[in-house]
């Protein structure tokens, strides 16, 4: 009987540890899907379409964001592809964000990183010793939406670049 209790105790402890380890991935699960993104970017109202899906054996969540606004040549004003993953050893999220504003190298300094919070994914990209880009995805469980805030922090002064809401498309 004591052996059974010990085995159950070990299994329960392992199960609890597994649950805690999977919590960041469960948060990302809420971001998978098709979304309409509305709000302000650089002080202007905008609407984008976002599609997020798990890829490469659920190692990364790929987001594809496309502006509904078009250039004179008919292409989207903005387009981005993001890859968000969870690094268990570092206990942090990592994100590679590629977009149509400029070419970017693939060096380590171009990866955003952040420790998870209960309902948010706070990511920081250190642009220089005096500037950082803070990007925070926050899940709103009550209406199953996400809020995305992007702030440029230079010399300790914060300047909001984006405040948008992702609403699920049915």
Image (cartoon, rainbow, N blue to C red):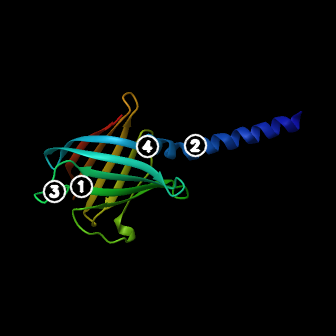
Residue behind mark 2:
20
Q: Is residue 8 visible in this depiction of the protein?
A: yes
Foreground label between 2 and 1: 2
| Label whose residue precedes the other's in the sequence (3 or 2) | 2
- Give the Cα separation between the discs numbered 4 and 2: 12 Å
- The CA distance from mark 1 to mark 3 is 33 Å
Q: Secondary structure at mark 2?
A: helix
- Secondary structure under tag 4 reads loop
Quarter of the figure with residue 168: top left
For the residue pair 22 and 53, the one nearer the viewer reads as 53
User: Mark 4 or mark 3, which is nearer to you?
Assistant: 3
For mark 4, what is the residue? 117
Tag 3 or tag 1, which sits nearer the N-term?
A: 3
Report, in whole angstroms, how far the alpha carbon at label 4 lies from the one at label 3.
Answer: 40 Å
Give the labeled residue for mark 3: 74
Does label 2 or label 1 sit earlier along the sequence?
2
Q: Which residue is mark 1?
A: 153
């Amino acid at each position: 009987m004591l052996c059974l209790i010990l085995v159950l105790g070990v299994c329960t402890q392992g199960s609890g540890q597994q649950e805690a380890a999977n919590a960041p991935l469960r948060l990302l699960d809420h971001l998978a899907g098709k979304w309409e993104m509305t709000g302000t970017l650089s002080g202007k109202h905008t609407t984008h379409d976002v599609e997020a899906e798990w890829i490469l054996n659920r190692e990364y969540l790929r987001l594809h964001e496309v502006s509904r606004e078009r250039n004179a040549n008919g292409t989207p004003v903005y387009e981005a592809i993001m890859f968000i993953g969870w690094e268990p050893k570092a206990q942090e999220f990592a994100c590679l964000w590629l977009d149509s504003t400029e070419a970017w190298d693939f060096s380590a300094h171009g990866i955003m990183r952040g420790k998870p919070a209960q309902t948010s994914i706070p990511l920081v990209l250190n642009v220089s010793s005096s500037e950082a880009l803070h990007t925070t995805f926050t899940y709103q469980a009550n209406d199953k939406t996400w809020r995305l805030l992007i702030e440029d922090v230079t010399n300790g002064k914060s300047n909001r670049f984006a405040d948008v809401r992702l609403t699920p498309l049915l």
